[in-house]
Image (tube, rainbow, N blue to C red):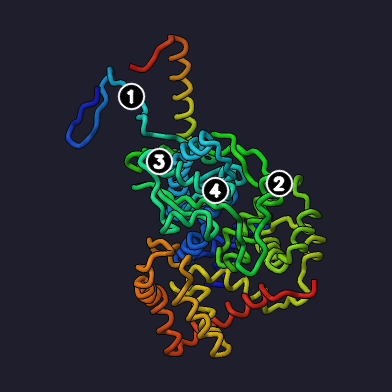
Amino acid sequence: MITTVGSRLMLTRDARLQISEQVVTRRVGDETVLLNLESGIYFGLDPVGSRFFELLVAFVTRMRRAFDMTET
Amino acid sequence: MGIKIRATLLDCLHRDESRLDPAALSVLTDEGWTALIEMATRHGVAPLLYQRLKTPNLVGCISHEVLDRLRGVYLNTAACNMRLYEELRPLLLALRAAGIPVIVLKGVYLAEQVYRNIALRPMSDIDLLVPASLAREAWRVMKELGEGYRLIYPATEALIPLFGKDFVCQKPGGFTPVEVHWTIRIADEKDCMDDEELWQNARVARIAELDTATLSVEDFLLHLCLHASYQHEFGFGLRALCDIAVFIERFELEIDWSALRARVLHHHWHKGVYLILYLASFRVGAAVPVEVLTALEPADLSVEVIEQAERRLFDASTEMAGMTLNTIGFFKPGRLDDRVRVLWRRLFPSREEMAYMYPIPPGSWVLYGYYLVRVRDLIRRHGAVAWYLLRGDRELAETVRRRAALREWLFKPDAQ
C-alpha cells in the first residue's frame, strides 16, 4: 500500500509496485531511460541505477516464471 | 572565441579520440562551456559531445553542471526517439499487413543501427520510401490507421504520387511528422537516385524491433552525401558530417568504394559528394579512402569553394529565417531579367504546385484566388529578409553572394 505523509509518498510492507503499461524503457549506452508514453515524462537512470533496474526486472521475471505467477 | 570553440567541438567529434587535448577543456570558462554546448545543440551533436566528454580521462576536466546540462540533452533525445519508434512500429506493421514494401531512410536507421544508441542521433521526422505505384495505397493505410494520419503536404491528396516526391503527414496529437517518399530526388538540376536499383539493392535491417528493409550500404552512404550536399547545400551542420563518419566506420569493410565512385562519376554527382566527403574526412575524421577523394576531386575545385561550404556548414543554423533558395535566386548579383523570372515563378507557380501547397484541386477556379494567399504567404516568409536586403544590409548581402557562388559551382557541370 502507498500512503502519503505530508507531501511524501510512503510505502508500506504490503505495497505492490509494478511498471505501468504506458512506460517503456530503453538502454542508451550505460544509462537507461524510462518514458511514460501518455504523459511524456521520462527519467534517466545512471549506470548504477540502470544495473539495479536491470537486475530488478530480471529477478521479478525469474520469480514469476519459478512460481508460474501471472499479473493480477 | 567562436573559432576556438568551433575547434574544440570539432576535436570532440573527431573519430580519432587522441585529437582532443584535455588541457583545451580545462581552460574553458563558464562562458566558453555555454558557447560550446549551444553550438553543439544547434548542430544536433550535443549527445555525441556528452558521450565523448563523460569518458574517464576527460570527466575530471568538466564541471558537474556542464555534464548535467549535456546529459539533459542526451536523455531528452533518447525520450523523443523512443516516442518516435513507438509510433513507427505500428505504422510499419500496418504497411506490411497491406503488402506495401517499405525502406527506412536516414535517421531512423542511423540511430538504431549505425550509432547503435538512439540517444546519440536527434531526429525531427521519420523518412520512409515506398514504391511509387503503392504510394497512394500507403496513404490510404495511414489515413485509416488508429486515429488516422492527417496530410500536411501535399494539401490535395489527389496529387499523390503525381506531383512532387513525397507526402508528409502526422497523427493528430502525434509526435513526429512522417515523410513518405516514392522517389529520392536530389535537386531539380540533378539525376534522381534510380528507384529500381534502390529496391533491388535493398537489404534487411532490424528497426523498431521489426525486420524491415533499408538501402544497401553504398546507396545509404550516397544518399547521405547527396542529401547533405545538393539537397541542403551543406546547411545541415556538423550532424551530417558525423553521420557520414560514423556510417563509414560502421561499414568500413562492406562499402564497395569502386562501385560508389563509378556511380557518382556516371551521374555527375562528384562535386557535391567530393565536397561533403572531404569535409567529413578533414573535419571529423571520416575514413574515406584517399584514392576515392582523388578520383572524385572536381577539376575546378578552389579554396574559396571549400571555405564557402564550410562557412555554410557552420553558419546555416544561425541564418535568418526566410533565407531560402528563392531569396538567394532573387537577390544574388546578376541580371534584372533573371530576377524578374525568379519572382514571377515564385509568385505564380503552376496549378499543380498551388494544389500541393493549398487545399484546392488543380482544376478548380477557386485556385486563382489562392494566388493572393500565395503573395501574402511569400511576404510573411521572406518579407523580413527582403526588407533588410533592400535596405542594403551588407552582412546579409554577403551571405547571399556566398551562397549563390557555392550553388553556382555545385550545379555547374565540369569537364570530369
Question: Which is nearer the N-term, disc 2 or disc 3?
Answer: 3
In contact (CB < 8 Å): disc 2 and disc 4: no
Q: Residues within 10 Å of mark 4 (few under 14, many from 20)?
A: many
Q: Residues within 10 Å of mark 2 (few under 14, many from 20)?
A: some
**Residue B251, which numbered label?**
2
- Please indicate whether residue B296 sits to the left or right of residue B40 in the image: right
- Of all chains, the one bearing label 1 is A
- Name the foreground residue: A70 vs B14: A70
Q: CA distance from mark 1 to mark 3?
A: 37 Å
Can residue B59 be seen here? The reply is no
* Amino acid type at image mark 1: Leu
Question: Disc 2 residue type?
Answer: Phe
Report the residue marked by disc 4. Answer: B128
Q: CA distance from mark 2 to mark 4?
A: 21 Å
Amino acid found under the numbered disc labelled 4 = Leu
Labels 2, 1: front one: 2
Location of mark 3 (residue): B144
User: Mark 3: which secondary structure?
Assistant: loop
Q: Say whether mark 3 and mark 1 are on the same chain.
A: no
Please tell me which residue is depicted at 50% across the width and 44% down the height of the picture: B137
Q: CA distance from mark 3 to mark 4?
A: 18 Å
